[in-house]
Image (cartoon, grey):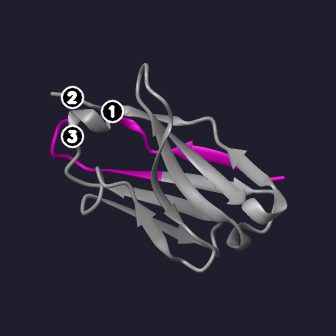
């Protein structure tokens, strides 16, 4: 079992930056693939970025070059650095921990990011 708690969301203006954090507890953090997803109002939840247990990363095309995902296994924490934010980045951002081969899939409750002038 993994518990995930996101933080760092808020209201920012276009072009500004935010850093989201996801604190994990309850299991061996380093063994999980970790990801950030987002869900805009009235839309489906979509992948933003993922980092595997071997530290390989992948990003949605819409955030490539602006967002950076990273993990600190010593602190059991996942990060998402978001730069050059746009209004279309407005969404609830969710942290995910997954070990697919074992059928393990955990979600945080989300943190709201609003980009508006």
Residue 106 image point, x, y percent: 72, 47
From which residue to which does the magenta span run?
1-20
Question: Mark 1 falls on what kind of element?
Answer: loop
Residue 19 image point, x, y percent: 38, 53
- State which quadrant residue 31 falls in: bottom right
Question: Mark 3 falls on what kind of element?
Answer: loop
Q: Residues within 10 Å of mark 3 (few under 14, many from 20)?
A: some
Residue 55 image point, x, y percent: 54, 77
Q: Is residue 113 visible?
A: no
Q: Is residue 110 left or right of residue 13?
A: right
Q: Disc 1, disc 2: CB below 8 Å? A: yes
Residue to which mark 3 is pinned: 86
Residue 41 image point, x, y percent: 41, 21
Question: Mark 2 falls on what kind of element?
Answer: loop
Residue to which mark 2 is pinned: 116
Please give the name of the residue rendered at 55% of the width and 61% of the height, measured from the top-left corner.
78
Q: Residues within 10 Å of mark 1 (few under 14, many from 20)?
A: many
Residue to which mark 1 is pinned: 90
Q: Is residue 91 left or right of residue 54?
A: left
Please give the name of the residue rendered at 28% of the width and 50% of the height, measured from the top-left corner.
62
On screen, residue 102 above or below 89: below
Q: Which numbered disc flags the more N-terminal residue, 1 or 2?
A: 1
Q: Nearer the viewer, residue 2 or 9?
A: 2
Q: Which is more foreground, mark 3 or mark 2? A: 3
Q: Which numbered disc flags the more N-terminal residue, 3 or 2?
A: 3
Queried whether the magenta region covers residue 15, the answer comes back as yes
Please give the name of the residue rendered at 36% of the width and 58% of the height, measured from the top-left corner.
81
Q: Nearer the viewer, residue 88 or 72?
A: 88
Q: Residues within 10 Å of mark 2 (few under 14, many from 20)?
A: some
């Amino acid at each position: 079992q993994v518990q995930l708690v996101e933080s760092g969301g808020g209201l920012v203006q276009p072009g500004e930056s935010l850093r989201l954090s996801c604190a994990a507890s309850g299991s061996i953090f380093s063994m999980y693939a970790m990801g950030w997803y987002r869900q805009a109002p009235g839309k489906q939840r979509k992948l933003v970025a993922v980092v595997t247990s071997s530290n390989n990363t992948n990003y949605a095309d819409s955030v490539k070059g602006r967002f950076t995902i990273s993990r600190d296994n010593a602190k059991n924490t996942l990060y998402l650095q978001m730069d050059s934010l746009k209004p279309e980045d407005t969404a609830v951002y969710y942290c995910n921990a997954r070990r697919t081969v074992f059928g393990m899939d955990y979600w945080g409750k989300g943190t709201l990011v609003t980009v508006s002038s």
